[in-house]
């Protein structure tokens, strides 16, 4: 029994300190050098085993998690990140990462959580993001991302959190997203998104928090949104919405619906108190 126990310890130790594939080590070193690693708050000693590198988790000889949040990374993301095919979590929150999101990020198909928020990333969200089918959380807020939200995001059937606020995104919300029935939190505020809200948003049955604050949406807020039974928070303020708002929506736990008229005066959308048979809302005069 003692020999078996000793052998188990040896095997465990060999697994713990076994080298990761050369391509993965290259990816880590490229990340370190491309983001000015010698100036990181918590640096890596490249002479030591990768298992001792801050924020890196290795299992079964593969890098499965990188968490370098708030660690003074300055520079661009290297394309070699695509070598880390076993990665399930990548957290680079609150650094000074510039440039664009490398297209090879689409190779990280085991990724469950991706946080690139609070950096200085520019350019479009790459369409290959739709290849990350295991993603449950995607956070890219507070960057300088531009262009349209890629339709391919709608392919992320397991996604529960999508946070893209405080960027420079434009265009309409892709119709493909309305099939995202696992999505609980959708934060798109402070962009340049536009168009009318589709009644099909009511198909996002798990939605609990929807923030569209400070965009360029217009038209009437669809009454169909009241069918989102789990919705608790809705912020549609500072857009170009008009008309009436469903009474059910207006009575949510948290509801913000302040608009600014042509004279620059803040106003609140009127609330319907009932619907007639023709689905024409009657305003609440209170």
Image: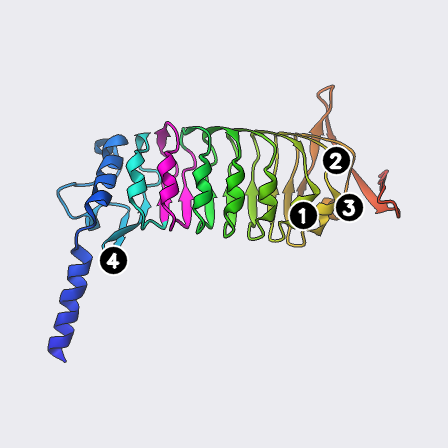
Q: Position of residue 10 (x, y in %)?
A: 13, 66
- From the image, tell me which residue sits under label 2: 220
Q: Is residue 133 above or below residue 76?
A: below
Q: Is residue 64 above or below residue 40?
A: below
Q: Secondary structure at mark 4?
A: loop
Alpha carbon separation for disc pair 4 and 2: 53 Å
Tell me whether the residue at label 4 lies in contact with that at label 2, contact meaning CB atoms closer than 8 angstroms. no
In the picture, measured across the screen, residue 135 lies left or right of residue 154, that is left
| Residue tagged 4 | 60
Earlier sequence position, callout 1 versus callout 3: 1
Which quadrant does the N terminus fall into? Answer: bottom left
Q: Residues within 10 Å of mark 3 (few under 14, many from 20)?
A: some
Q: Image quarter for residue 99?
A: top left
Q: Residue at x 16, y 48 (%)?
A: 49
Q: Mark 1 to mark 3: distance in Å?
A: 16 Å
Work out whether mark 4 precedes mark 2 in sequence or the reverse, and give the earlier one: 4
**Is disc 3 placed on a helix, strand or loop?**
helix
Crowding near pointer 2: few (<14 within 10 Å), some, many (20+)? some
To which quarter of the image does residue 240 belong? top right
Circle 2 SS class: loop
Q: Which mark is residue 202?
A: 1
The boundaries of the magenta stretch are: 89-118
Instruction: Report how far apart the C-alphas of labels 3 and 4 lie in the structure.
Output: 54 Å
Q: SS for tag 1?
A: helix
The residue drawn where x is 23% and y is 54% is 61
Q: CA distance from mark 2 to mark 3?
A: 14 Å
């Amino acid at each position: 029994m003692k020999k078996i126990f000793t052998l188990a310890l040896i095997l465990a130790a060999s697994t713990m300190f076994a080298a990761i594939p050369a391509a993965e080590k290259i990816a880590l070193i490229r990340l370190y050098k491309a983001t000015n690693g010698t100036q990181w708050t918590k640096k890596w000693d490249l002479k030591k085993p990768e298992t001792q590198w801050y924020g890196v988790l290795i299992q079964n000889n593969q890098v499965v998690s990188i968490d370098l949040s708030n660690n003074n990374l300055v520079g661009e993301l290297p394309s070699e990140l695509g070598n880390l095919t076993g990665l399930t979590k990548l957290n680079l929150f609150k650094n000074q990462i510039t440039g664009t999101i490398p297209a090879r990020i689409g190779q990280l198909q085991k990724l469950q959580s991706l946080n690139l928020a609070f950096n200085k990333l520019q350019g479009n969200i790459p369409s290959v993001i739709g290849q990350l089918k295991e993603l449950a959380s995607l956070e890219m807020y507070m960057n300088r991302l531009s262009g349209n939200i890629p339709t391919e995001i709608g392919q992320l059937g397991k996604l529960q959190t999508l946070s893209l606020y405080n960027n420079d995104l434009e265009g309409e919300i892709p119709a493909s997203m309305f099939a995202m029935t696992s999505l609980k939190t959708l934060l798109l505020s402070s962009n340049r998104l536009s168009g009318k809200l589709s009644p099909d948003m009511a198909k996002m049955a798990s939605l609990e928090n929807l923030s569209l604050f400070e965009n360029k949406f217009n038209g009437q807020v669809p009454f169909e949104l009241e069918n989102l039974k789990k919705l608790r928070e809705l912020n549609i303020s500072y857009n170009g919405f008009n008309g009436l708002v469903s009474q059910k929506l207006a009575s949510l736990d948290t509801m913000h619906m302040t608009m600014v008229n042509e004279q620059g005066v803040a106003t609140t959308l009127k609330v319907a108190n009932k619907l007639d048979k023709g689905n024409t809302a009657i305003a609440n005069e209170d």
